[in-house]
Image: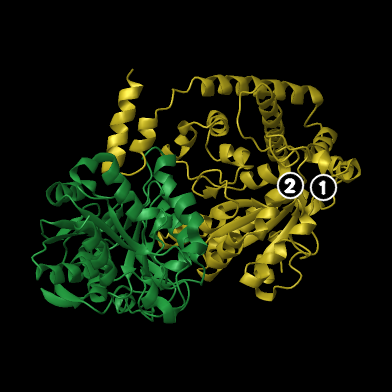
Amino acid sequence: MAAKSKHVVDFEHIKSTMSDPYKKPVQVIDENGKIVNQELFDRFSDDELVTLMEKMVWERALHEQTMNFSRQGRLGFYAPTFGEEASEMGIAHAMKKQDYLFPAYRDLPQLIQHGATVKEGFLWSKGHYQCYDYVRRGVRAWIPQIIIGAQYVQCAGAALGIKKNDEKDTVAYVFTGDGGTSQGDFYEGINFASSFQAPAVFFVQNNGWAISVPRKTQTAAETLAQKGVASGVPGVQVDGMDILATYLVAKDARDFAASGNGPVLVETLTYRFGAHSSAGDDPSRYRTKEEEKPWFDRDPLIRLRKVLTDKKLWDQEKEDKLVAQYKDQFKQDMKDAEAAPKQKVSDFLKHTFEVPTPDVAAQIKEFEAKESK
Amino acid sequence: MAKLTYIKAITDGLDQVLQDDPKTLIFGEDVGKNGGVFRTTVGLQDKYGTDRVFDTPLAESGILGLSIGLALTGWRPIPEIQFMGFTMEAVDSIGGQMSRNRFRMSGDVSMPITIRTPFGGGTHTAELHGDSLENLFVGIPGLRVVTPANPYDAKGMVISAVENNDPVLFMENLKLYRSMKDEVPDGHYTVPLDKAKVVREGSDITIVAYSAEVNEALKVADKLEKENISVEVIDLRSLSPIDTETIFNSIDKTHKVVVAQEAQKMAGVGAQVASAIAEDDIMSLDAPIGRVSAPDSVFPFAMAENDWLPNADDIEAKVREILNY
């Protein structure tokens, strides 16, 4: 039993029994900043606690600055991450450099943590080919997926590729939201990875809303974690507003998959504080202040800030300084993004096939002539 | 050199690429132990093992999504979609994902995926088994769509498709699988993916066709030869891109053309051939462009297939109409 207690979640047990895999979300600190699991809390050093707080502050600052840029008309499509900092940074903190990441469009912060730059994030939003330079640099991450669910089947493929390449201590990470669990590709992805016992870690960030459609409309299933059960994939829920719990569960999930035990499904319970996207979505059309209030009270920064302040590891001045420092950097990143070269249609054509087809070759010439004027 | 059926030629080609490149993988529904529902992959799992040739769960989007992830991790996937009608389940993986990845990555990421899929009418099978769906796919940038019409091309083109670093939709004609034999060289050889072929030379009129319609066109050419009408037949082989050069060279000589396809008429391959001629070589013609296709209904109930599919009689009638214009 002693060996087992090292795990926060006993995925092995869940997998072998598939019983009650989801009833009690893992939590370390509650919304009042009270440590509810001292044993788990004690696993973190002071430095780690501060690092996790800094990452959440960084993500919140990135969100705020991005919204500013968005209002100034300096960005294109942007999916706000406000409220999901514990979920996103907790999971990202458990990733290793050699892991493959399959993000969706709300997962730019994790993508940046994995090796993309903020400038590339801005370029993705604005629509410029240099947004994917991180792939060229060898960062093991794919595109922020737009077609909800597609990243899940591709993750299963990468996980199988990892297994076939016999790469040790390596997994494929993938994210979707609550709405994404309704897609056929969601099931195909977890089931394929399960069939091949491939090292995939499937995350569902359940933020309550798929644009205007609430979680309860997606499914009558009690949890989204239990959706793994039918595929033979152990699933677990975690308090996605508690970065300590999220990190520990993500790390366990990763360890389990990386050790050749097959895929895992983790549902983080979080909340989209803001709109679906910067493109005119207005949450007041479909949800009430009464619904939002308890979730705002669960703000992941509030609870860790309180714990760290009590431990004299954090204060408002330090946070304000950090935020200012991050935002200054983001402003520079935006300037760099705005200095990206003008894109050429002839380049797009050149990148359509490895060897341009005759029609495409003719169109390359046509556009090069236009572009040289 | 051996006389092989169309299907055996494909098996031979797949055997060759599995042997040549240890990164090639064949997978899909029933392709492993069973060797595919048509036995196209028969014997390959025994020869190369379950790591290289394996069955997957039954889900087409999953199969092609898997292909993308495998390609990203350095593999060269050769997935099978059991019937072309089933590609409907996987349109995002094809048109929304794999075909865009080179473009997304400015040329730095390849998706060397060959999707093999059987299609074509005349075998009286269940719904969505015989449909010619190429018209849906030829408009997708970054995707090659090819289909051989004989065993020699079948082997050479499947090898070329697998060796190509872009996604290729490789359409295999169901009716041709076992209905034709041809001399097929042993070992490795390739047939280009983007070149049409003049399969019969002639001087009075050109028929542009592909897949099973090539054989129908050849029957017409044989018949009209007895009336001293000389018909040139072109097998497109590649449906995207279309080798217009070969077509233009032919009509510069014959000045008349009929474009034949088994798919429905709306948009697609025949329409693209006709518009390319109209755009760039119309002055070579001394009669309108003739088109032979299936009508624009849904692919028919099996018992009515023969009434619906365009055949040699339809092509002959259209050829005579254009000759007598």
Label 2 neighbourhood size at 10 Å, few (<14), some (14-19), many (20+)? many
Q: Quadrant of residue B294?
A: bottom left
- Give x and y (percent) for residue B112: 34, 54
Compared with A270, B157 (above or below) is below
For the N terminus of chain B, which image quadrant? bottom left
Q: Quadrant of residue A324?
A: top right
Q: Which residue is mark 2?
A: A244
- Give x and y (percent) for residue A52: 69, 39
Q: Residue at x 76, y 65 (%)?
A: A221
- Give x and y (percent) for residue B202: 10, 59
Chain that the image shows in yellow: A
What amino acid is found at the position of numbered circle 1 in the picture? Ile
Check the rendered structure and report the hue given to chain B.
Answer: green
- Give x and y (percent) for residue B90: 49, 60
Instruction: Specify whether A68 is left or right of B65.
Output: right
Local SS, label 1: loop
Compared with A212, B79 (above or below) is below
Instruction: Say which label, 1 or 2, has the lower sequence index.
Output: 1
Local SS, label 2: helix
Q: Residue at x 14, y 52 (%)?
A: B254
Instruction: Report the number of numbered marks.
Output: 2
Instruction: Specify whether A330 is left or right of B41.
Output: right
Q: Which residue is mark 1?
A: A29
Q: Nearer the viewer, residue B13 or A348?
A: A348
Q: Is residue A355 visible?
A: no
Residues tagged 1 and 2 counted as in contact (Cβ below 8 A)? yes
- Spatial separation of the CA atoms under disc 1 and disc 2: 8 Å
